[in-house]
Each structure stands twice: as C-alpha cells, then as structure tokens.
Image: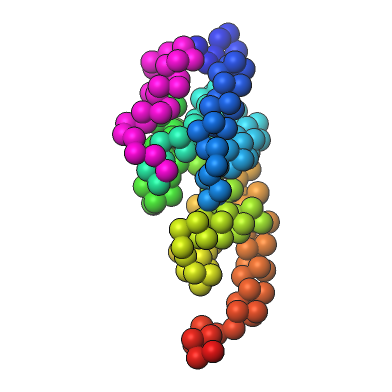
Amino acid sequence: MITGSDPHALNDLAVEQAFKYVEELFAGNAGGHDAEHTMRVFRTALQIAEGEPGCDRGIVALAALLHDVDDPKLFNTTDNRNARAFLSACGIAAGQIEQICRVINSVSFSSNRGQTPDTLEGRIVQDADRLDAIGAVGIARTFAYGGEHGRTLRDSVRHFYDKLLLLKDLMNTDTGRKLAASRHAFLETYLRRLEEELGPEEENRRG
C-alpha cells in the first residue's frame, strides 16, 4: 500500500524503485523527456502538494515519477502498461494503481486540452509537468526536442506561441500559479530578444 496510518505518507521503497526505473527507461533520451525531467516534475509536484491540504502525497509522488513511462511519443504501449507493470511489481494495491493511472492520464497537454483533472492529485501533477515546460528549463527542452526531431529554429519558436505561452493561465493551484508567473515572464523576455536577433522571417528567406 502507498499509504498507511498517515494518509500523506510516501512509500519510500516504491519511490526509490521508481527513481531507478525511470533512469533505466529513459537512458540515452536527450529530447527533453528524460529522467532529469521526471525528477524535476517529482520535486515540483511535492512542493505544490505541501500547499494543498488533503492531497495523497503517495499518489502524487508515484504519478509524477511515472507520468511519462507510457508517453506515446516515446513508447508503443496501451492502457498504461509500463506504469501498471511497475506498480504491480512494487506491490501497490489495485485500487491505488487505478488512482495513479488516472492521474497520469490527466497530465498530457495535447490529450487533455481544455480539461481540468478531476482529482486534486491530478491537478498537482499536471501543474508540475507544465511548469517544467516554461522558464529557462522549458526553453532548453523545447530546442532539445526540436533538434532531435528535425525542427528548424523557427519551428521551435512557433511552439512557444502554440503551447508554452498559454500555460501560465492554465495552472490549477495557487503554488503553480505563483511559480508560473516568473517563468512566464522569463519566456516573454527571452522571446523578445530571440526575435530581435533572428530578424523578420521574410528577410532570412531572402538571405
């Protein structure tokens, strides 16, 4: 079980095993969805959870750690197969596995556009994942992913307008909103400087 007498307790053994699992699973991935991304989401999710009384920190922790292990951009799995197999091997109860998978499935921006997770734990992990897409780290991840997938610099810049600049206003929690404000401001400052240095797209085409 994730929780015992303390409803906010973490299953330290399962968390430690999840650290190792994601490090092995994402070894060699350099496109922004790697073990370091997972660990940042995990730390941010627990930071947000501190300000959300009543959340199950065990569910938050394991959902954050496993939120990308069945990402369709990376793995050809269905029904959270990787997450379920890992959690079952850790002895997590079936009902809690379902809770964790429910949270995982509520995180993705593209799959849940316009939808707010229906659990507090889902709202926390979604905020944590989205926070890692903005600010200095978000910028670095965008260009890392773009380079890995053959996107031009301009293609990657468009991603800021299609997604990243929208995230500040989509935060679910007070802590998420506070963290997003400064990261969003940095994005805007960076983009102004980048656009200035790139120059108009038409001029670049003419050389």
Residue at 32%, 31% (x, y): give it: 79
In the depicted structure, whether residue 21 falls above or below residue 136? above
**For the magenta stretch, what is the residue range?**
74-98
Residue at 34%, 39% (x, y): give it: 76
Residue at 60%, 45% (x, y): give it: 176
Residue 162 visible from this viewpoint: yes
Q: How is the image coloured?
A: rainbow
Residue at the extreme top of the image, as rendered? 5
Residue at 50%, 60% (x, y): give it: 146
Q: Position of residue 167 (x, y in %)?
A: 52, 55
Residue 51 visible from this viewpoint: no
Query: In the visual, does 89 lie left or right of 23?
Result: left
Q: Position of residue 156 (x, y in %)?
A: 51, 65
Q: Position of residue 165 (x, y in %)?
A: 54, 62
Residue at the extreme front of the image, as rendered? 28
In the depicted structure, whether residue 192 falls above or below residue 141? below
